Amino acid sequence: MSLLFVTDEREYLLEPGETLESDLGILEVPEDVQPGDEVETHLGTVFTARKLRGPDLFHHLERTGAPMMPRDVGLVMGHTGISGGDRVLDAGTGTGILASALGRAGATVVTYETNEEFAEVARDNMETAGVSDRVTVHSGDIVDALDDLRGEGFDALTLDTGDAPTVVSAAPELLVSGGMVAVYSPFVESTKDVVETAREAGLTDIRSLETIQREMDFDSRGSRPSTAGVGHTGYLTFARVP
Ligand SMILES: C[S@@+](CC[C@H](N)C(=O)[O-])C[C@H]1O[C@@H](n2cnc3c(N)ncnc32)[C@H](O)[C@@H]1O
């Protein structure tokens, strides 16, 4: 089980038995290390072992396809209500930020990734996230797999791919009645395609949201939204199978 080893200024993701050499000294992680334990480097720097949580995974999983931001993960979970016991069909896996979050919420996830190397990394990431028993990463194109997936009766479909409309059109055959669809789209045009396809497929409760988040700065001069960076990430479309 991977744990975070944290000082005031640094954190490292390490396995029991692993040795880390840095300018802070050599850190030898005991095989029986537990969250909350303190481990000292040979130069005397003390690291505290910490159990990984979702935001830690966002920072420490190996990145391949652009990972979904925590706020968008939160919106997907909030608007679909995906929770323990649900069966979710997901694509593309990418880094696996969304798939691992859904798995950590207790859902069983079947996720597809076209890029074989990305899929391999995602499988390791699911091990790190502690959800490899609930998240199955398939190498391949979800569109090619649709014929095998029809009739599976998933509770939710989560998509973060350019060809999402093709999958959305099959949603009524992939999901149970009342099942939820969530699609992340980077552009207005791709969002519109998803909405039109959802309408043609007879889905209900179709809703698209632009996701914007503003961080607040508080300093001695006053308080205001941060001037660093743009708060826009993309668009999320939600819909439901009647
Ligand atoms: C933006 S990333 C997904 C990030 C992911 N949602 C996460 O939270 O880490 C998109 C991924 O989808 C994969 N992809 C694109 N089209 C696909 C398809 N039709 N089937 C499976 N994977 C696909 C790409 O290779 C890429 O890795």
Image (cartoon, rainbow, N blue to C red):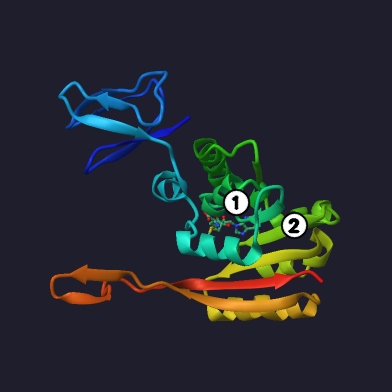
Q: Position of residue 40 (x, y in %)?
A: 23, 24
Q: Position of residue 133 (x, y in %)?
A: 64, 36
Q: Is residue 35 left or right of residue 201?
A: left
- Identify the residue at horizontal 15%, vertical 24% (top origin): 43
Q: Position of residue 124 (x, y in %)?
A: 52, 37
Q: Is residue 52 left or right of residue 133?
A: left
Compared with 203, 106 (above or below) is above
Q: CA distance from mark 1 to mark 2?
A: 12 Å
Q: How many marks?
A: 2
Depth check, front residue: 217 or 149:
217
Q: Is mark 1 within 8 Å of ligand 1?
A: no
Mark 1 belongs to which amino acid?
Leu
- Identify the residue at horizontal 64%, vertical 56% (top origin): 91
Depth check, front residue: 135 or 94:
135
Compared with 52, 15 (above or below) is above
Compared with 220, 12 (above or below) is above
* Mark drawn on residue 212: none
* Crowd rating for badge 2 (residues with CA inside 10 Å; few <14, some 14–19, many 20+): many
Q: Secondary structure at mark 1?
A: helix
* Mark drawn on residue 155: 2
- Identify the residue at horizontal 77%, vertical 75% (top origin): 203
Which residue has dot 1 on it?
102
Indicate the quadrant of ligand 1 in the picture.
bottom right
Compared with 156, 189 (above or below) is below
Residue 205 is drawn in which quadrant? bottom right
* Crowd rating for badge 1 (residues with CA inside 10 Å; few <14, some 14–19, many 20+): many
